[in-house]
Image (spheres, rainbow, N blue to C red):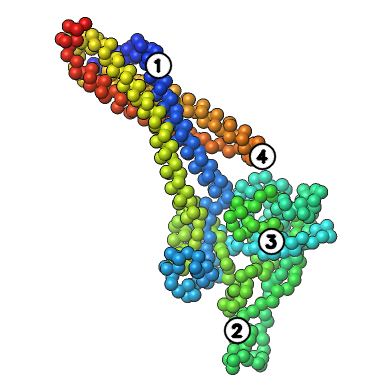
């Protein structure tokens, strides 16, 4: 029997019992719709979490610290370097080497100091942090009032909206374009002392007579700044040291001002005149290259951390969630499978004479099986397409309801249900396969019918 004749005969047979076959097809579509809706919800929630993390600018970032400074925080990592005091120092030469690694776009220090802002004749305190120019891509600046820094070394500031309200409670937006004065402590190295200074313990001078910069002084300075913008939320989702500030300056400006930081005492105790850092933030060209950059920096003897380390458990959670959603969504399709079996078994009983005539005029057992498989596949295909349409409608309703709920809570709308293109084809293919499996028993039963007994019975 030719394929065209087989399909034509199957469609004609399905039309003979429109109500029963239609209800079976609807059952398949409901099963597919529930499966699609469940899996699409899992995909949407995963992409929502991914967008939130990606928008925070952390997916392509590696944080580098010295093992000397953070010993005891990670016992597994400490075991790899049992002598952290012999680990390299995170200084300017180390920063240069990291900058030269493949796929690294920028390496900036995490600078956060306490400052004093004078505006409208009043003084206010707040943390001052340095931001690189790449921070403009962060979602916190999507609703920026004003503009971003004109350059990475400009005497400009962006204020947190809450801090701007403290400076000007009546009209904080009026601060944009105005000048403020920042008072801070500048770190200055001690001058070399004369060689005839009395020595301590019969050996070394108490300061830098031995050539070491063993000490520093803090000098009060002030710097005029132009306020260029206001932001409503902390950048990087508040997950970085530099995000927990109230006054944001270009990172090159903070380095030029040589602000005294909390880590300067630690640096001075080490001795030496070189500049050291508590943390360096390494920006990677592609999030897929983060692990390679981490491995390269670890080989230098430093400790690294990235959000990818923290999201391993998150990815595991969504994998398990998708699995369970798929299982529960498939239950309705399992019920539809029973309906297919019931429909085709009834068709075998009702069409005994037709099957007997087909076999009497030369149809083989395989031809009869193919006919019932074609009917089952046709119901699966139509049910799959209708299920996709129904699942899409359910998803749109979920997004619409979620948007209303978020709007009532003064939150931006977020799509929590997303149907990826691959799921459309996979759902239809799965529906057809399940329908064909459901047609195994009815097809085998129809093929085993004896044409003589069938015609005699009729």
Tell me the SS state at disc 3. Answer: strand
Query: Residue 127 got which mark?
Result: 3
- Residue 207's tag is none
Q: Which of the two discs, 1 and 3, labels the residue nearer the N terminus? A: 1
Secondary structure, mark 2, is loop
Q: Where is residue 403 shown, x and y percent of the image?
A: 60, 34
Say which of marks 3 and 4 sits in front. Answer: 4
| Residue at 39% in and 24% down | 28
Q: Residues within 10 Å of mark 3 (few under 14, many from 20)?
A: some
In the image: residue 191, left or right of residue 298: right
Q: Is residue 366 visible?
A: yes
Callout 4: helix, strand or loop? loop
Which residue corresponds to the image point at 43% horizontal and 72% vertical from the top-left?
A: 82
Q: Which residue is mark 2?
A: 211
First along the sequence among labels 1 and 4? 1
Secondary structure at badge 1 equals helix
**Which residue carries the number 4 mark?**
410
Q: Which label lies toward us, 3 or 2? A: 3
- The residue lying furthest to the right in this view is 121
Q: CA distance from mark 1 to mark 4?
A: 45 Å
**Quarter placement of the C terminus:** top left
Q: Is residue 423 left or right of residue 149?
A: left
* Mark positioned earlier in the residue sequence (2 or 1): 1
The earlier-in-sequence mark between 4 and 2 is 2
> Disc 1 designates what residue?
22
Is label 1 in contact with label 3 (beta carbons under 8 Å)? no
CA–CA distance between discs 2 and 1? 92 Å
Q: CA distance from mark 4 to mark 2?
A: 60 Å
């Amino acid at each position: 029997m030719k394929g065209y004749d087989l399909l034509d005969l199957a469609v004609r047979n399905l039309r003979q019992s429109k109500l029963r076959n239609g209800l079976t097809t609807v059952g398949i579509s409901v099963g597919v719709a529930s499966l699609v809706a469940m899996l699409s919800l899992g995909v949407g929630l995963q992409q929502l979490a991914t967008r939130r993390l990606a928008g925070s600018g952390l997916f392509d970032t590696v944080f580098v610290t010295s093992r000397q400074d953070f010993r005891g925080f990670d016992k597994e990592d400490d075991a790899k370097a049992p002598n952290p005091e012999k680990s390299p120092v995170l200084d300017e030469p180390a920063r240069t080497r990291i900058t030269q690694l493949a796929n690294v776009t920028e390496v900036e220090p995490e600078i956060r100091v306490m400052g004093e802002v004078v505006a409208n004749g009043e003084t206010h305190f707040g943390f001052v942090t340095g931001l690189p120019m790449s921070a403009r891509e962060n979602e916190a600046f999507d609703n920026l009032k004003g503009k971003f820094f004109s350059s990475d070394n400009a005497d400009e500031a962006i204020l947190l909206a809450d801090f701007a309200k403290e400076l000007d409670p009546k009209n904080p937006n009026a601060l944009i374009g105005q000048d403020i004065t920042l008072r801070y402590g500048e770190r200055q190295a001690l001058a070399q002392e004369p060689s005839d200074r009395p020595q301590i313990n019969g050996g070394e001078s108490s300061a830098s007579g031995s050539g070491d910069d063993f000490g520093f002084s803090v000098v009060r300075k002030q710097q005029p700044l132009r306020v260029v913008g206001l932001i409503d939320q902390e950048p990087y989702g508040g997950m970085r040291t530099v995000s927990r500030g109230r006054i944001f300056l270009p990172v090159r400006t903070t380095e030029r001002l040589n602000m005294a930081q909390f880590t300067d005492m630690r640096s001075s105790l080490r001795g030496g005149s070189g500049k050291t850092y508590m943390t360096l933030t390494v920006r990677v060209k592609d999030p897929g290259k983060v692990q390679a950059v981490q491995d390269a920096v670890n080989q230098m003897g430093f400790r690294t951390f990235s959000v990818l380390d923290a999201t391993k458990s998150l990815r595991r959670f969504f994998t398990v969630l998708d699995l369970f959603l798929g299982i529960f969504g498939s239950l309705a399709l399992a019920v539809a499978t029973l309906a297919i079996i019931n429909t085709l078994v009834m068709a075998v009983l009702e069409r005994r004479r037709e099957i007997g005539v087909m076999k009497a005029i030369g149809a083989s057992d395989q031809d009869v099986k193919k006919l019932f498989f074609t009917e089952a596949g046709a119901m699966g295909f139509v049910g799959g397409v209708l299920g996709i349409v129904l699942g899409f409608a359910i998803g749109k309703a979920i997004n619409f309801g979620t948007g209303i709920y978020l709007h009532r809570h003064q939150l931006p709308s977020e799509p929590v249900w997303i149907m990826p293109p691959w799921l459309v084809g996979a759902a239809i293919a799965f529906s057809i396969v399940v329908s064909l499996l459901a047609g195994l028993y009815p097809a085998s039963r129809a093929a085993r019918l004896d044409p003589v007994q069938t015609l005699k019975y009729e």
